[in-house]
Image (spheres, helix red, strand yellow):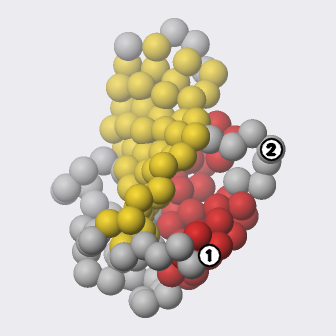
Amino acid sequence: MEKHFMNPQGLPKWEHAFSQIVTVSSGSTQTIYLSGQVAMDQHNTLIGEHDLKQQARQAFENLQLALSSVGATTQDVVKINIYVKDYKPADASIISEAFRIAFPHENLPVSTWLGVQALALEGLLIEIDAIAVVAV
């Protein structure tokens, strides 16, 4: 079994706190663990302050960027967790719209959506982590 810890270009810079991606290869399978993606750009600037729609789109874009950095796509995602600060049922349609842009295909991953009191940094409204599996 082989593990790789990565912090690819284009994503927020958190390398002093955690790895953005960990891949674990075993035989002909690689499992990709993606840290929670948020609405921060590569310069750690918050995108879409007070705007869940903008933040959801940015978080999903970061998720896609993380996947592409290891040769994967959203079609390879098998599990996704979505954490929403102060979640309200009306938020579902906003998040679903951003989700369907990132996951336009028929076979969707299993998912868990959670409403949370707070996220790691002030101003963040959504965080998305995922697990993907690819053949190597």
Circle 1 is placed at which residue position? 94
Say which residue appears at 46% left-offset and 83% top-offset: 47
Q: Position of residue 44 (x, y in %)?
A: 35, 75
Q: Is residue 83 above or below residue 21?
A: below
Q: Position of residue 79 (x, y in %)?
A: 53, 40
Q: Please give the count of numbered marks on the rendered protein.
A: 2
**Is residue 126 toward the left or the right of residue 64 in the image?**
left
Q: Nearer the viewer, residue 124 or 24?
A: 124
Q: Is residue 102 above or below residue 95?
A: above
* Residue extending furthest toward the bottom: 50
**Is residue 101 toward the left or the right of residue 32 in the image?**
right
Whether residue 2 is visible here, answered yes or no, is yes
**Is residue 111 toward the left or the right of residue 22 in the image?**
right
Reading the chain from its start, which is encountered first: label 2 or label 1?
1
Look at the image and tell me in which quarter the N terminus lies: top left
Q: Amino acid at mark 2?
A: Glu
Whether residue 8 is visible here, answered yes or no, is no
Q: CA distance from mark 2 to mark 1?
A: 20 Å
Picture quadrant where residue 6 is located: top left
Q: Is residue 136 above or below residue 132?
A: above
Say which residue appears at 38% left-offset and 37% top-offset: 22
Q: Nearer the viewer, residue 51 or 16?
A: 51
Q: Amino acid at mark 1?
A: Ile
Label 2 element class: loop
Label 1 element class: helix
Question: Dot 1: few (<14), some (14–19), or many (≥20) neighbours within 10 Å?
Answer: some
Question: Dot 2: few (<14), some (14–19), or many (≥20) neighbours within 10 Å?
Answer: few
Q: Position of residue 17 (x, y in %)?
A: 19, 55
Circle 2 is placed at which residue position? 106
